[in-house]
Amino acid sequence: MERRQYTSIAKVLHWTMAVVIICAWVAGYYSSTLSLPQKIQTDSIMLHKSIATITLFLLAARIPWRLIHGAPEASCGVPSLERAAARFGHLLLYICMLVLPVSGWLWSSAAGFKIPVAGLFFLPPLMDKTPALAPIFKQMHIYVAYAIAVLVCGHVFMALKHYFVDRSDSLESMLPSWCIRRRESSEQKHQSSTG
C-alpha cells in the first residue's frame, strides 16, 4: 500500500524549519537594511544568528531522516514533468538551506565575529579571521537568502495550487494529523447535511 503521509517526525522538522527560516530571514533582512542605532542593530544581528544557526542542527536531523524514510508517493494525476520539477525544486531548497547558514558562519568567521546558537552557546569559527574574504561570503549569504525566499514562495504557491486547483492530497501529506481529521470530519458533516 502506498504511503500518502510524511512521518510525524518529518512533519515536525518541516514546520519547525519553516518557522525558523522565516524568522531568521526577516530578522536578517531588517537588521541589514534598516538604519538602526548601533546597539539595536548589533542585538538584531545576534538575534538573526541565534535563530539561523538552529537550522544547521535541524538539517542534521532532517536530511538523514528524509534519506532513510523518503517521501510519500505523488498522486497519480500529477504529470511526470511536474514531479521532476518538484524533485529538482526540493533538491535546490535543501542545498540552499545548507549553504545559507554555512555561508553566514563563514562570513562571521572571516570577519572575526561570534556565532551564537539560540543564545545558548557559540559555534567555533570555520576559519581564522580573514577580513579580505568576509565580503565574498557576505555576498554569497545575501544571494542565497534571496534564492531561498524565491524557492519558498514557489513551494508555497505550488502546494496551494495542488490543493485548490488540482484537488490533490500533496499538501495534506505534510499537515499535522489533527488538521486532516478536522477537515475530514467537517467534510463528512457537510455531505451528511446535503445528502
Image: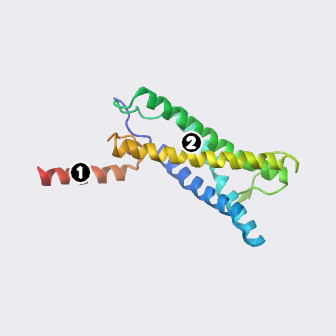
Looking at the picture, which amino acid does disc 2 mark?
Arg
At which x and y percent is residue 103? 73, 46
Q: Are marks 2 and 1 in contact (CB under 8 Å)?
A: no
Tell me if 79 is positioned left or right of 37 in this view: left
At which x and y percent is residue 24? 63, 57
Towards the viewer: 45 or 138: 138
At which x and y percent is residue 163? 36, 44
* Badge 2 or badge 1: first in the primary sequence: 2
Tell me if 63 is positioned left or right of 104 in this view: left
**83 w.r.t. 157: above or below:** above
**150 w.r.t. 49: above or below:** above
Query: Which residue is rendered at x = 24% and y = 54% of the image?
Result: 186
Q: Is residue 118 visible?
A: no
Residue at the spot of label 1: 187
Marks 2 and 1 sit apart, C-alpha to C-alpha, by: 33 Å
Residue at the spot of label 2: 62
